[in-house]
Amino acid sequence: MSAQQPLSTHGEAGLERGAVDLQRYQHSLMGTFGVPMRVLKRGEGSYVWDADGNRYLDLLGGIAVNALGHGHPAWVEAIATQAATLSHTSNFFATEPQIALAEKLLDLAQAPTGSRVFFANSGTEANEAAIKMARKTGKSTIIALEGGFHGRSTGALALTHKEAYRAPFAPLIGDVVFVPVNDEQALADAVAAHADDLSAIVLEPIQGEAGVIPLTHAYLTKARELTRRHDALLVFDEVQTGVARTGAWFAHQLHGIQPDVMTLAKGLGGGFPIGAVIAFGERCGTMLGKGEHGTTFGGNPLAAAAALATLRVIEDEDLIANVKAVSAHLRERLEAMAGVLEVRGEGLLLGIGLAAPASAEIAQAAVAAGFIVNPPSPDTLRLVPALTLTTAEADTFLTWIEGHLAAHPLTSGDQ
């Protein structure tokens, strides 16, 4: 598949509409995201169109957010119906969608009696609540992982490892210790060094922003064992891995390891902002009391309706089975390609490990050809498409990248 010819007319000074819009963007928005690749106007299923009429297969899905693709009829109907009924109340009141969503999440998470849910607006906010829960243990040291990403607010940023994100805003909250990924001995040593003050171990079952790095079953098992032994919380950040993304409702279910706290966002609302904290069991479920945390918009009925619709469509259309099938198809073809060293991850959270640090150049060539992918690290391309992606749609990208890699062979010396 290649990009369609532009359908729009030229704008001022002979520029295409998209170029004009990008100029407007740079004059009116803060430069926190750099210069956007394109100005997108609409989406349908796994495709989006830019301001100049070019079509793209969206294999990034808003970074694992658009679980149902763009404009799914059931999702649109649920939001429209709820918006016409009740869109927001303060948290002095409860609403049926909020209660139903909490019940549904507890059921899908197989949470024991006494478990509770807190709703926020994003993964960062969910992780802020988890940090407060860790502090409520009466201890302060949190162990997090090198390469981990948990958000950019000053609390969540303290758990995010990348120095470039952290340095401009130091000092952050203290008592955070970073350990290498999948190094069981380093984890055990860090726990032993802080045994009397360990409040939590916080980790992503698969590190998305680091380049799709899965944590091993043995490592997750060790984290569970150590937190139980030292009466600390095991917190799984499933902001990116949750909501059927990995071929299970939640990635930790692939390992049969239940955390004390799980944070969610991204795909939960199918494109509508919502975050959630699931606290497993009576102790964690009652850890944050009245007035100890809050949010104006968290769990509003519009967001809850969007999330309920997302979960129902995943069930009704058996999208977990689709995730597994399309994932296996992608993996099989990609692993056979020259220039691809490995395919990491689970389900439709995949990292294509390249033979050279050429991911940025390939991603740029991909968007020019009509495919949106992401280079989270120099030698990795990340795929996090809609859970509705078909094998036929995936094949158009697979054919393109196979041809691109054949025309531009990768060697270890490529820069």
Image: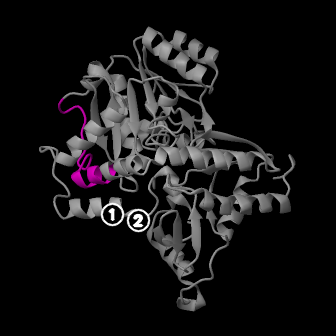
- Return the x and y of residue 61 as percentages of the image width and height: 51, 56
Of the 4 image quadrants, the one containing the N terminus is bottom right
Secondary structure found at label 1: helix
Count neighbours of disc 2 (C-alpha within 10 A) and say few if under 14, some if 14 to 19, many if 20 or more: some
> Percent x, y for residue 109?
37, 32
Residue under the image location 20 percent in, 58 percent down: 87
The quarter holding residue 277 reads top left
N-terminal of the two: label 2 or label 1? 2
Q: Which residues are magenta?
A: 290-307
Alpha carbon of mark 2 to alpha carbon of mark 1: how far? 6 Å
What residue is shown at x 40% (from left), y 45% (from top)?
265
**Residue 310 at least partly seen:** yes
In the figure, is residue 163 to the left or right of 226? Answer: right
**Residue at position x 56%, y 66% from top?**
36
Q: Is residue 264 magenta?
A: no
Tell me where residue 259 appears, x and y as whole percent.
42, 24
Label 2 is placed on what type of residue? Answer: Gly
Q: Which mark is residue 76?
A: 1
Q: Is residue 300 magenta?
A: yes
In the displayed structure, would residue 78 be above or below residue 237?
below
Say few, some or many: other residues with alpha carbon within 10 Å of mark 1 (under 14 / 14 to 19 / 20 or more): few
Report which residue position mark 2 lands on: 71
Up/down of 350 relative to 285, above or below? below
